[in-house]
Amino acid sequence: MNCCITLRDIITWCISVAGIGIAWWQFASRMSALRKSRIKTQKETWFLHVIVLPSFPQLEEFYDILIKTLEEEIKYICESADNTNANAHNEMIAAVKANILTQIQDFFAPFQAIVESADPTIGKEIGRHMQSLQDAATQLLDNYQTVKPIDVKNIILQNKKKVLSSLNSSIRE
Amino acid sequence: MIKKIELTKQHRGGGKSTSFSGRDEGIEVRKELRIADKDRDDDQYTIILPCDTTSFNPSFYLGLLFDSLEHLGYDDFKSKYRFDLQNMTESKRAAIEKNLVSCLQQAYNEYISSTGLD
């Protein structure tokens, strides 16, 4: 039996091997992309269900209480302005501000830690929003003579919007 | 040697505000007072606030001192920069001390996450 390998056989064999290689490479890269996408979806679902959704009612309650507290404190500071001397009034404002700053920090510090454990970038953003909220609250108290309840609501709710937007950013991407 | 850093009413951003607030404002004051140069010397500093201050916010504190904390590390930073609130009444001192606890806590958290230490 005459058994010889021709150039044609070699080319056919090479093309077959290359075809199998390309098919394998395509399969492997598709599987890897699928695995990455599944991990990303799992992370997003976890972040959404464990952090974002359970925090909505707490955030809602926190901002409602903060708005009410600020409105009441501004009213109280305004009313007492005429009955107390300047130093005592200044001390009163300092005490109110210290309590509000602590109230904001007490809510946000543990919340920021949870978010940061899942997503450091969003966690840092939450930290910045907390500081902005503290600044907004002290500014409102500084302007107690001119500030109106609607200003309090608008300014504080702006901050809430930014916090929610940061939390949702992981899902939007 | 212990030296003084005196923050003024102008550093509060002027106007009627009695609060030190805003990270950018803190950074500006840091530049003006050349705090970065102070970080490199061997002196200790006492920071004094105007006596009518009603709030010292974490945002301002971080702008003013966070780079120092990163440069020096937590323990050295704490011993180098201290606040002297003796010019304030007892009630005011208590309020500002409460602010400073929040400031240090937030600075520490940010320091930990920036360095990856735990």
Image (cartoon, coloured by chain):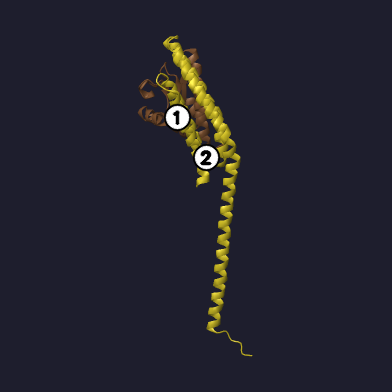
Q: Tell me if mark 1 has few (under 14), some (14-19) or many (20+) residues whose alpha carbon lies within 10 angstroms of its own.
A: few
Image position, residue A23 (x, y; %): 56, 68
Can you identify the residue that label 2 sits on?
A: A167
Marker disc for residue A38: none
Between B111 and B35, the residue placed more toward the observer is B111
Q: Dot 1: what SS?
A: helix
Mark 2 surroundings: few (<14), some (14-19) or many (≥20) residues within 10 A: many
Q: Who's the residue at 49% across and 17% down the image?
A: A95
Establish if A33 lies above or below A12.
Answer: above
Return the residue at label 1. A154
Q: Are marks 2 and 1 in contact (CB under 8 Å)?
A: no
Q: Amino acid at mark 1?
A: Asn
**Residue A90 falls in image quadrant:** top left
* Mark pair 2, 1: CA separation: 20 Å
- Identity of the residue drawn at 55% across and 27% down: A106
Look at the image and tell me whether residue A50 can be seen: yes
Residue A132, given in percent of the width and then of the height, sits at 46, 31
